[in-house]
Amino acid sequence: TYVIAEPCVDVLDRACVEECPVDCIYEGGRMLYIHPDECVDCGACEPVCPVEAIFYEDDVPAEWADYTRANVDFFDDLGSPGGASKTGKVAKDDPMVAALPPMGE
Ligand code: F3S
Ligand code: F3S
């Protein structure tokens, strides 16, 4: 799977959403999260993010390693909705993300 990391927080550019062929990039309160089971590893999202927030799971920088977990845990109560557009914005974030000071520009 691919993982969205800290640079997305408070930026939420959403260019990645347009590229994903399986609509598996879900919007939370302060960032977006990739569904680890719905992502088919096509990689189309990674180069379009203007803040380089997206990484293949094996390439997540060590400082952001906990975002791999956060992209998984986000779906603990959502399960596998099978589509981000029909799900819409989910009004929550991983606790690690929710605790961050204001980020981005
Ligand atoms: Fe976030 Fe980049 Fe997508 S800022 S919403 S991961 S294009
Ligand atoms: Fe979609 Fe990116 Fe995975 S475009 S299928 S989330 S690699």
Image: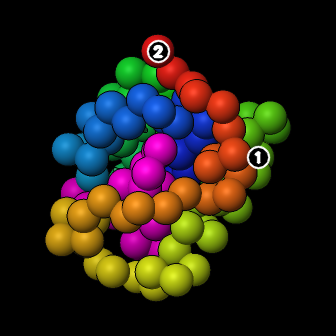
Task: Say which label, 1 or 2, has the lower sequence index.
Answer: 1
Identity of the residue drawn at 45% across and 80% down: 78
The span from disc 1 to disc 2 (Cα, nearest Å) is 23 Å
Q: Which residue is mark 1?
A: 65
Q: Residue 38: within the magenta?
A: yes
Q: Residue 28: within the magenta?
A: yes
Identity of the residue drawn at 27% across and 47% down: 17
Q: Which residues are magenta?
A: 21-39
Furthest toward the right, the residue is 62
Q: Where's residue 13, x and y in %?
A: 33, 32
Residue type, numbered disc 1:
Ala
Q: Where's residue 86, x and y in %?
A: 18, 71
Residue type, numbered disc 2:
Glu
Q: Which mark is residue 105?
A: 2
Query: Neighbour class for label 1 at 10 Å: few (<14), some, many (≥20)?
Result: some
Residue 34 visible within the image: no
Is disc 1 in contact with disc 2, using a CB cutoff of under 8 Å? no
Residue 95 visible within the image: yes
Q: Secondary structure at mark 2?
A: loop
Identity of the residue drawn at 73% across and 40% down: 64
Dominant SS of magenta comes to loop
Q: Which mark is residue 33?
A: none
